[in-house]
Every structure is written in C-alpha cells, then in structure tokens.
Amino acid sequence: MTTQQQPPATDDTETLPDPVPLYGCPYKSNPYPLYERMRDVGPVHRVLFPSGVNAWLVTGYEAAHAALNDDRLGKSHDRGNERWRARASIMPEPQHSQLQVHLLHQDPPKHTHMRRFVTDAFTPRRIDGLLSRIQQLADTLVDALPDTGPADLVGGFAAHFPFRVLAEVIGLPGELAARFDRDWGKVVQPVGPTDPGRPLYEVRLHGLQSYIAEVVAHKREHPEDDLLSSLVAARERSELSQEELDSMVFQLLVAGQEPVTNQITTALIALFRNPDALDRLRAEPWLMPRAVEELLRYDSAFELTTWRFFAEDGDLHGTEVPAGDSVIVSLCAANRDPRRFPQPDELDLGRSPNPHLAFGHGIHFCPGAALARAELRIALGTLLARLPGLRPAVPDEDIEWIPAVLGRGTNHLPVSYDRRL
C-alpha cells in the first residue's frame, strides 16, 4: 500500500503512526484532538480498527464533501477485496446475504430503485403532521421519570423515545413494538469470529432476524397505509427481493432509532460541558432549531460513514488507494474543520450558516434527517423545559462511551434535576 507522504515533524506538525489506531477509551471519549492532528497532516490516512480492519479515513471538510459525492466510490460489499473481507465480513452467512443488502450497501441504479420506497414516509411535510404525536410520546416518557433526580436519561428516555416515534412513522404495531429488544441493535457493532462475545452476538442476530420475519408476516396478513405495509406489497409485486425487504426492515429498525438515541446523549453532554450555551438555550428556547444543527455539527452520533470502495486503484486527494480497500469518511472530523467552520471547537448555538455533514451528503444523505431533526428538537426542548436544573450526576470522566466503531453515544447518562414539571 502507498500511504500519503507526510511532512517532517516540526513544532507545529506531528508524524502520525501508520496506520493510525482508532480505538480505546481516550479516543472514544474525545476523538477531536486526534482528528485535528490528522487534518493538519493531510486529508487521507490509513487507519486501524479494533477488528483488525485497515481502512482509508478522509478527515477534512472539502475532502469529505468530495468523497461523499465521488461516483468512483461505491458502497456494495461486492467491491471489497480479499484483505477487507478477511476482517470486515463480520456478520456470518446466511445472515450477511439476507440482512446486509439495504440502502447503505447499494449503488445506483439499485440504490435509486430501493430508496424511492422509503422517501415518502420521511418527508418534512409528513413529519410536520406528526409533531403533536411526537411531543405526546416525549411527555409520556418524562411523566414516568422520578419527581426529582437522579435518573438515567438513557434508560428513562433516550433509549425509548426514538423507537416509539419510529414505530408510529413506519407502522410497527404496538404489540410488536413492545417486544423489540434494544440489544438486537448491537448486531451492527463488530464482533469478530474469535471474540469471546461472539456467541451472544449470534444469539442477538438470530433473535432480530426472527423478529423481522414476524413483522413481515404480520404486515402481509394485516396490510395498512404505512411504510412497512408498502415494502411488503413491493415484495409481493416482485419489485423487491425477500433479502432486500428483510434488509430494509433491518435498516429501519436499527439505523432508524439507535443513532437518535445516541445523538440525544451527545447533545446533552455537549450542553453540560458548555453551561453558558445550556443557560442560553433555556432562556431562548426559540433558538432550538438552530441549536440542534450546531449540536449535530459539534458532536455527531454518526461519527464515521460505512465503507466505500474503488472498483480500480484510484487517487484520493493525493493518496493512492488500492481497489477494494475500504474508504471511510469521518463526519465528525469534517464538521470540526477550521477551514469551513470558524472556531470549530466552540459550541455556538447561533452559528449560521452551518453546512455540517452530520447526515452525510449526496445520494446516501440520510432519508430520515427530517424525522431525526424533529425528534431532537422535541426531546431536548421537553427535557430542558420539564426538568429545571438538569445537570450531570457523575463527573465527566466517569461517562462511559459506547465502543461502537462508527457511532458516538453513551449507554447511560445519570442526571440530576430540581423537580419534574
């Protein structure tokens, strides 16, 4: 492999290891100092993930924006070379073939064909019509919190709110929604074949696959005017294969709620770490839409994109990348690039313009972005309004960040507050 030529170390630049390791508690709790060093050296770096996968990481804003719109970079796993497959094909067969052919792993024209089945369910107009119901779901969860703190805002709110909203949007029946196990979502976190956690991983995988089959069977027998029913109907018309249908339901259930759970936690932690911004948002709640955009930029739950591949050896901003090697874009590193965002490490709730890449860009821009924005506005607004004095209940260094490779968030967020209104 040919790596990007790096300038010699000086007082202002530092030679980075090759590859750069992307794991460990210091990195997960605060990756931004490392991203700053990487951007200072160049836009593309070879990196190493805990699974042993080597990849090429894009870090600067302009380079990230270009990579997200680069027609040469495809998403299909069929493009991956043997080096990548040896480490990255974590999900075993037959589940890999049955659950991994969703939108995130498709290229045009297949991607274009499949995406049209979901976009209508997530339009801003449709989401605007659901705002009162989303607010009701948020209030119901806050009603169940203790009258006074402490409380865990993940277990008591953030872990449930996005899934309840998602169930309403896609048409997941209440009895099935109540039986969804959040642990199933962990099947997207890499657990290699020799990892001690592999048996539990496979139990979760089989449980989720059985659940998806039950959802599909229910919607086939009880069709309604909703997204899940329309996907099942598309399968009945042979417009989707069974594997594509199951994979799209898989993507909706996992990618449609866990990142919002994590974004609620990253946003709250950012506000706790910036008390002046927190006080301003409490005093000026009308700032919430712009504040959400800044919180998405400041610390995105979508830290890294999923794999992209060159079909042939290609030049990526001065770095020669072999065909089939994985290329990953760091959305978080791009969103802190000082060449695009003045004072990028400052949380400025009034920042405008704010062309962050938290939802990606190009043809793979997150189709659920409008829903996620609405959920974040309502979740943060409700928590701040109804829990006066909301503050962390543990020292910042005791917050445990999830070990997920591509995302940021916490499994627990202990808080205190004066009372529940």
Image (spheres, rainbow, N blue to C red):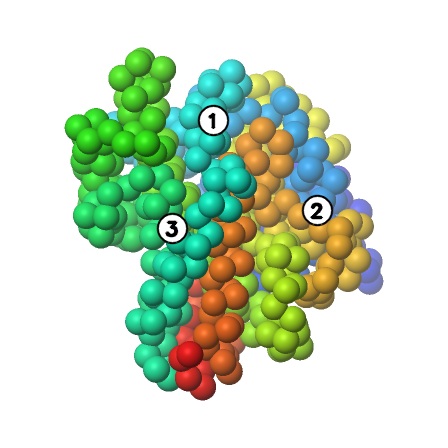
Horizontal and vertical percent position of residue 412: 38, 68
Q: CA distance from mark 3 to mark 1?
A: 21 Å
**Residue at figure coordinates x 53%, y 40% from the top left:** 125
> Which of the two marks, 3 or 1, is nearer to us in this view?
3
Q: CA distance from mark 2 to mark 3?
A: 26 Å
Q: Amino acid at mark 2?
A: Pro
**Circle 3 sits on which residue?**
165
Answer left or right for 131 relative to 309. left
**Residue at figure coordinates x 67%, y 48% from the top left:** 356
Horizontal and vertical percent position of residue 194: 29, 45
On the image, which quarter does residue 342 sit in?
bottom right
Q: Which mark is residue 355?
A: 2
Tell which circle, 2 or 3, labels the residue nearer the N-terminal end.
Answer: 3
Relative height, residue 346 to residue 321 (above, below): below
Residue 254, can we see it?
Answer: no
Element carrying mark 1: helix
Q: CA distance from mark 1 to mark 2?
A: 23 Å
Horizontal and vertical percent position of residue 95: 27, 31
**Circle 1 sits on which residue?**
115
Mark 2, residues whose alpha carbon is within 10 Å: few (<14), some, or many (≥20)?
Answer: few
Q: Amino acid at mark 3?
A: Val
